[in-house]
Image: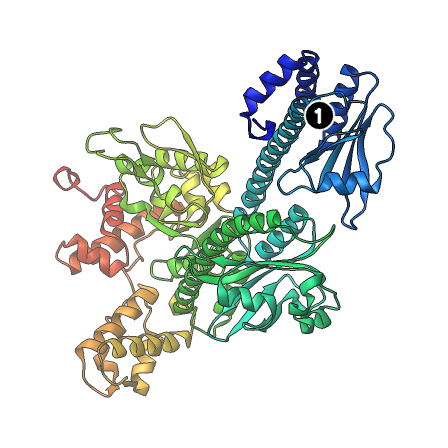
């Protein structure tokens, strides 16, 4: 049987049986895998193992260069330079016996190599075949292991690279990061990512060094990139195919492309939406391995880009909504107080400071709070409002901080509190002066450390919330009366915005009235009526105890219930409010006592007007019913039955 046709293991067994010294040599050759650092190092070790087993021998490995010449890459003993005739014969045959004997080391995707053995001409063809087989197998095993290790390392580098991409939100920054990391990964000079604008039939590439804005725009049917997006197939170009390169781009970039690798970017449905391009391999041309690698990188890049684009679309949509909401919020008026208020809001909005908004009921505290939010960099995040006056102590903690399932009777599921819901945005605490002392203590703790713990929970949850609090009460006086915590007051009173009552805003009353009347007339699908001179005079003279809320309600009533083209004074149905008479308040009283007496008379006045209807009285006074109930309880105006 011809040795080349023998089963490999049978061949080795026969060779060793024929020459027992081969066993030691072949074993030593195989062991070179354990310490080899490179293929050349391995082949040198294999050559040394041969010479150690046959001291009078010599071995060398020569490798064909890109120029066609042959160069020695490994040697042991004192081998003679290989003659051209030996190389010629060896490069065309598997094994050539003689002195030197030649063994062709053909390894996939590797340059041609020859193993030349001197002083081993006494070995039989079978023994020579065994040496050749072990040498090839060992070298191939080293190459395979190296490829596995290289691939593992490339995958590790790729995952690290992709992970960085996922943490980049801005699209332009993301494209630059992709290009920069890919040039390093593939040892290229430049890289660009082209996104396909099919509507305009153009490709927009970033980054593009030497171009204004770092953006290159080219037709989608020109050059290699155009061919890739049109065909959906990768393209590799080197000096042999340099005519395919779009030299117009080279001219614009003042750059010379001598090698290029480009692969398509595919979305989840497999449709092309762009291309990933590498330019100029630093050492030679791009290989099949590079192409396979870039295809893999492009898959990850496409997923990140598609996700980034979706996020960008959502962000753009969110910003449009925020802008639309902000546009609906207006501080209408030309009075000096409103001009100053606008300046204050502009200054405050750009900060992260807590804000305390003060003013009578109906002056627009919530409007100002919303304006602060929508003019800040938090406008794309939630604005959550909480009416502290409407929350009894039993619900306050659960409402603000959330609760875990089973924390109390009726807690059938876990619920996030208002602080969690507002994280990243703004929490508006209305009627903060009506919060209980217990609730104030818990609120202060969260404001200090930005950590909340749900009711019934153990885990502290970090939140990032800006607090805007509002009240119509005199907080310093409440602090003196020990009805409001001094430390919480100082925590909230970092920036204070005071809203003027409507009666002090002069002609702003007319501007607001006309604006409200126009809004409600549009909703009522009718022409906007005009104010007569006496109606304007009546509007300006009215004290507007309910402030803007009262004016708004008045205009709504006119828009929906009247059909006249001109609004006259008698149509306004405004009750002349001078408020309860307070002449009975003794001047020598302390302010707190006088305030309580005034509040009692003021409430009795409205309760009498509504025949004891607390809900209607609260509405007329511009307060919440629960707030009025609490105030009457504080003033001792409720009997036991009403308190219950």
Q: Position of residue 395 (x, y in %)?
A: 27, 37
Q: In the displayed structure, would residue 296 be above or below residue 148?
A: below
Q: Find residue 268 and report its image quarter.
A: bottom left
**Going by the picture, which residue comes out furthest to the front?**
1
Q: Is residue 632 left or right of residue 205?
A: left
- Looking at the picture, tell me which residue is in the foreground, 390 or 427: 427
Q: Is residue 9 left or right of residue 624?
A: right
Could you classify mark 1 by the number of other residues whose Cα lies within 10 Å: few (under 14), some (14-19), or many (20 or more)? Answer: some
Q: Position of residue 299 (x, y in %)?
A: 50, 51
- Where does label 1 land, which residue? 36
Q: Exactly how many numbered labels are in the figure? A: 1
Q: Which quadrant of the figure contains the C terminus?
A: top left
Q: Is residue 392 left or right of residue 38?
A: left
Q: In the displayed structure, would residue 202 be above or below residue 126?
A: below
Q: Position of residue 146 (x, y in %)?
A: 63, 33
**Residue 482 seen from this side:** no
Residue in the picture at 60% in, 50% down: 288
Q: Is residue 623 left or right of residue 1?
A: left
- Looking at the picture, tell me which residue is in the foreground, 450 or 79: 79
Q: Find residue 42 and report its image quarter.
A: top right
**Residue 370 seen from this side:** yes
- Looking at the picture, tell me which residue is in the foreground, 170 or 290: 290
Residue in the picture at 42% in, 72% down: 332
Secondary element at tag 1:
loop
Q: In the displayed structure, would residue 295 be above or below residue 253?
A: above
Colour theme? rainbow
Q: Position of residue 206 (x, y in %)?
A: 61, 62
Residue in the picture at 39% in, 34% down: 442
- Looking at the picture, tell me which residue is in the foreground, 206 or 189: 189
């Amino acid at each position: 049987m011809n040795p080349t046709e023998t089963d490999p293991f049978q061949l080795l067994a026969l060779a060793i049986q024929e020459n027992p010294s081969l066993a030691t040599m072949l074993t030593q050759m195989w062991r070179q895998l354990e310490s080899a650092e490179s293929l050349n190092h391995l082949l040198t070790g294999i050559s040394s193992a041969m010479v150690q087993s046959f001291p009078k021998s010599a071995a060398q490995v020569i490798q064909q260069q890109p120029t066609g010449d042959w160069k020695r890459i490994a040697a042991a003993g004192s081998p003679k330079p290989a003659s051209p005739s030996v190389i010629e014969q060896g490069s065309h045959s598997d094994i050539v016996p003689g002195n030197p004997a030649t063994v062709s080391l053909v390894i996939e995707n590797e340059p041609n190599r020859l193993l030349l053995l001197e002083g081993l001409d006494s070995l039989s063809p079978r023994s020579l075949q065994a040496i050749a087989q072990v040498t090839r197998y060992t070298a191939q095993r080293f190459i395979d292991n190296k490829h596995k290790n290289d691939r593992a390392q490339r995958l590790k580098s790729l995952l690290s690279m992709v992970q960085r991409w996922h943490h980049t939100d801005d699209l332009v920054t993301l494209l630059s990061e992709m290009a920069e990391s890919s040039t390093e990964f593939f040892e290229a000079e430049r890289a660009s990512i082209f996104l396909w604008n099919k509507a305009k039939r153009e490709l927009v590439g970033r980054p593009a060094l030497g171009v204004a804005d770092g953006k290159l725009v080219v037709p989608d049917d020109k050059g290699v990139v155009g061919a890739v997006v049109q065909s959906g197939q990768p393209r590799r170009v080197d000096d042999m195919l340099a005519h395919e390169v779009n030299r117009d781009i080279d001219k614009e970039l003042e750059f010379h492309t001598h090698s290029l690798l480009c692969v398509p970017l595919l979305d989840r449905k497999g449709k092309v939406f762009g291309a990933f391009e590498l330019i100029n391999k630093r050492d030679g041309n791009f290989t099949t391995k590079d192409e396979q690698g870039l295809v893999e990188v492009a898959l990850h890049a496409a997923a990140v880009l598609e996700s980034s684009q979706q996020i960008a679309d959502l962000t753009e949509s969110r910003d449009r909504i925020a802008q639309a909401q902000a546009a609906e919020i207006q501080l209408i008026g030309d009075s000096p107080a409103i001009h100053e208020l606008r300046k204050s809001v502009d200054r405050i909005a750009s900060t992260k400071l807590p804000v305390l908004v003060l003013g009578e009921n109906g002056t627009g505290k919530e409007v100002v709070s919303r304006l602060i939010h929508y003019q800040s960099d938090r406008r794309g995040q939630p604005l959550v409002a909480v009416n502290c006056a409407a929350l009894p102590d039993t619900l306050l903690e659960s409402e603000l901080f959330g609760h875990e399932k089973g924390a109390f009777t009726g807690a059938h599921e876990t619920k996030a509190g208002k602080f969690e819901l507002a994280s990243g945005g703004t929490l508006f605490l209305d009627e903060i002066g009506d919060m209980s002392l217990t609730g104030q203590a818990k609120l202060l703790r969260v404001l200090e450390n930005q950590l909340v713990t749900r009711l019934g929970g153990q885990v502290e949850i970090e939140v990032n919330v800006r607090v805007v609090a509002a009240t119509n009460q005199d907080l310093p006086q409440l602090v003196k009366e020990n009805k409001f915590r001094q430390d919480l007051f100082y925590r909230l009173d970092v920036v204070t915005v005071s809203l003027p009552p409507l009666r002090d805003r002069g002609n702003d009353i007319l501007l607001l009235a006309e604006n409200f009347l126009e809004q409600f007339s549009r909703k009522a699908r009718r022409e906007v009526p005009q104010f007569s001179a006496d109606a304007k005079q009546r509007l300006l003279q009215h004290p507007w105890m309910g402030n803007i809320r009262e004016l708004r309600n008045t205009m709504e009533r006119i828009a929906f219930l009247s059909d006249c083209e001109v609004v006259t004074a008698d149509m306004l149905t405004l009750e002349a409010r001078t408020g309860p008479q307070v002449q009975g308040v003794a001047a020598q009283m302390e302010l707190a006592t006088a305030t309580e007496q005034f509040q009692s008379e003021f409430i009795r006045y409205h309760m009498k007007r509504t025949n004891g209807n607390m809900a209607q009285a609260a509405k007329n006074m511009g307060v919440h019913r629960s707030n009025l109930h609490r105030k009457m309880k504080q003033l001792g105006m409720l009997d036991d039955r009403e308190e219950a």
